[in-house]
Image (tube, helix red, strand yellow):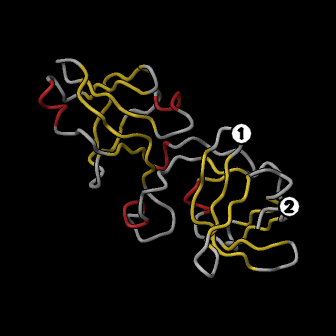
Amino acid sequence: MESSKQTAKRLTSPRQSRDEEATSGSSEPEFLVVGKIVRPHGVRGEIGMKLMTDHPEHLLQVETLYVGKEHRPYSVKRMRRHQTGMIIHFDSFTDRDMAEVLREQLVHVHIDDAVPLEEGEYYLFQVEGIEVVTEEGESLGHLSGLLETGANDVYIVTTPEGGELLLPVIPDVIKNVNVPDGVMTVHLLEGLR
């Protein structure tokens, strides 16, 4: 049995479609969303980015970021934390107008540059869509999303009837996650249905 510390690292945006994630036709995406460009910053080509990753400090080590649906590669000249986001200066950007064209675009890292996972941790894309069953074998539906609440994350399960079941991501509820077999086993505490 796997470790009871079974959580999903949220490095992909829950709004991102499978078509946008996977470019090779496999279930594993080539790129993961880490942020969204909000606006140019200053007049020298810097860009402000809203963070969409749990590990922003890891981005400071990344040399290339990929922007937009086409995953255009840009070499990072400088990057620094700024308030709740990042300020990025790409090598080829010299003025505000160059930075303006990237406004509102998603920023990605290559999967090879992603944060390494610890045992019992999963990227959200790895658990989205897996079947959720009780310890007794009753199918509850498929995992369709994640809510970040502050206290603990909550998995969203879409039931066969089209309803939603919310499951707190805590060891008392999430008993086993078998990514290769596509099955999550849960214990339904009283009041969860």
Task: From the top left corner, tell me how far across and down residue 97 is, in percent.
Answer: 11, 29
Q: In front: 50, or 45?
A: 50
Amino acid under disc 1: Ala
- Residue shown at 37% from the left, 61% from the top: 20
In the shown orientation, is residue 148 left or right of residue 176?
Answer: left
Q: In front: 73, or 174?
A: 174
- Residue shown at 19% from the left, 31% from the top: 99
Disc 1/disc 2 C-alpha distance (Å): 17 Å
Mark 2: few/some/many CA within 10 Å (<14, 14-19, 20+): few
- Residue shown at 58% from the left, 70% from the top: 129
Q: Which residue is mark 1?
A: 151
Looking at this view, name the residue that lies furthest to the left: 97
What is the number of the mark on residue 189?
A: 2
**Could you tell me which quadrant the C terminus lies in?**
bottom right
Task: From the top left corner, tell me how far across and down residue 153 is, in percent.
Answer: 67, 47
In the image, residue 39 above or below residue 129: above
In the shown orientation, is residue 153 left or right of residue 192?
Answer: left
Task: From the top left corner, tell me how far across and down residue 24 is, in percent.
Answer: 40, 67
Amino acid under disc 2: Leu
Image quarter of residue 17 = bottom left
In the image, residue 65 above or below residue 45: below
Mark 1: few/some/many CA within 10 Å (<14, 14-19, 20+): few
